[in-house]
Amino acid sequence: MRLTGRPELLKFARMAGGRLGDGVRALAAELEAAAWSNNADVRKAFPSSDLSGRRLTVPFDGDHCAVIAISYEKGVALVEYAGSCAGLAKLRAKKSDGRA
């Protein structure tokens, strides 16, 4: 897959540092190496992650995650969010309120 938003993901990796940063960089490498054609392929690669439609939420630990939008037709994985799970919840709440 072509990874779009890699800078956001790597910025988060630098900020997170240590073990978490290594996991974020590993996710970027895995996304770039992927050749998914459907949701079943994604579920096989990330069985413990949440896949809703074409949005993959990958947990790094109990407090941090990344949200990746997938376009199988274009072969693109787009980083929509990388950061704290609390920050993601706030962002989703704003969107549902129409504030974002």
Image: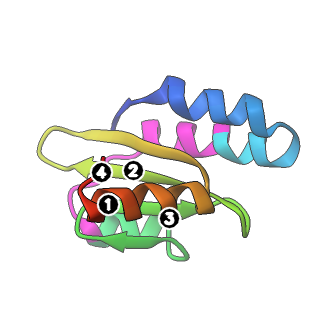
User: Horizontally, is 32 left or right of 55 in the view?
Assistant: right
* Residue 43, label in figure: none
Mark 4 touches mark 1? (CB < 8 Å): no
Q: Is residue 99 magenta?
A: no
Amino acid type shown at disc 1: Arg
For marks 2 and 1 on the same chain, the one whose residue lies earlier in the sequence: 1
Q: Residue furthest left?
A: 73
Location of residue 33 (image quadrant): top left
Residue at (32% x, 60% y) in the render: 55
Viewer-side residue, 38 vs 22: 22
Across and down, in percent, residue 12 comes to 65, 35
Could you give the CA–CA distance between mark 3 and mark 4, rounded to whole angstroms?
14 Å
What secondary structure is found at the residue carrying circle 2?
strand
Q: Which residue is mark 3?
A: 89
Q: Is residue 32 magenta?
A: yes
For marks 4 and 2 on the same chain, the one whose residue lies earlier in the sequence: 2
Across and down, in percent, residue 93 comes to 39, 64
Amino acid type shown at disc 2: Ile
For marks 2 and 3 on the same chain, the one whose residue lies earlier in the sequence: 2
Residue at (85% x, 47% y) in the render: 19
Mark 2 touches mark 1? (CB < 8 Å): yes
* Residue 99, label in figure: 4
Residue at (73% x, 64% y) in the render: 61
Magenta residues?
Answer: 25-39
* Residue 68, label in figure: 2
In this rendering, is residue 48 above or below 80? below
What secondary structure is found at the residue carrying circle 4?
loop
Amino acid type shown at disc 3: Ala
